[in-house]
Amino acid sequence: MVTKSRLLKILMAASAIIFSGSVLAHGNVSPQAVDVSTLPVIGEEWVEENPYRNEDDSTLLEEAVKIGKSAFNQNCARCHGLGGVSGGIAPDLRETLTPDAEGDEWFMYRIRNGAERNGITYMPKFEGIMAQEAMWALKSWLDTCDPEVDDDSSCWVGDEKNSCLTAEGQCE
């Protein structure tokens, strides 16, 4: 006959095994470096506005957007959601970030410094981990996302939306 305390121990052990899988499924939450070897070097001096936004070379803008999407998926999507559509953990970046100098300033401050309140890290610092080029590429991709659409289908994802990418970074 199984006693209540033994049954409780079995249930606790089973719960620990079951829920440990969900912790592992969360993935690597350490900030990941991003390969920006196909983008021109911006330099050590931090620029204030997205250097790819008004780029005359659409191929360079497309490359920045492609790298930005990858950077977002590797480093940001687990909290900010696919396509910047928040699942409730962190802000919806499509609504928070505007594709202009003001949005650039806020974005660079937050991505470089992270977010910490009362000793709790809400967002890691990416300065020193992610190159300036990667940060601006990430912002270039976010600028293509439409805040009116509730999924990531509005974001530039490759050749099928290549024709709608404008110099301002927005798809029409």
Image (cartoon, rainbow, N blue to C red):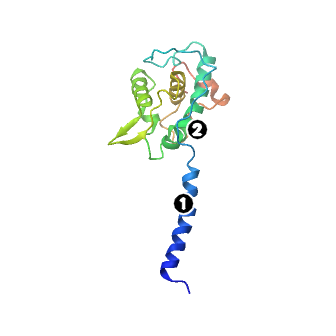
x, y (%) of residue 147?
A: 47, 36
Q: Which element type, helix, strand or loop, lies under badge 2? A: helix
Tell me the residue at 58%/38% (across/down).
Answer: 153
Q: Nearer the viewer, residue 1 or 26?
A: 1
Residue 131 shows up from this direction: yes
User: Is label 2 or label 1 in front?
Assistant: 1
Q: Which amino acid, by three-letter code, is at mark 2? A: Ser
Quadrant of the drawing holding the N terminus: bottom right
From mark 2 to mark 1, how far is it between C-alphas?
A: 32 Å
Q: Residue furthest right?
A: 159
Of 75 and 44, nearer the camera is 44
Look at 54% across and 83% down and name the residue there: 2
Instruction: Classify the position of the C terminus by image quarter.
Output: top right
**Mark seen at residue 168:** none
Q: Is residue 89 left or right of residue 144?
A: left
**Among numbered discs 2 and 1, the one appearing first in the sequence:** 1
Q: Which residue is mark 2?
A: 153
Residue that extends furthest to the top in the rendered view of this protein = 56
**Which residue is label 1 attached to?**
19
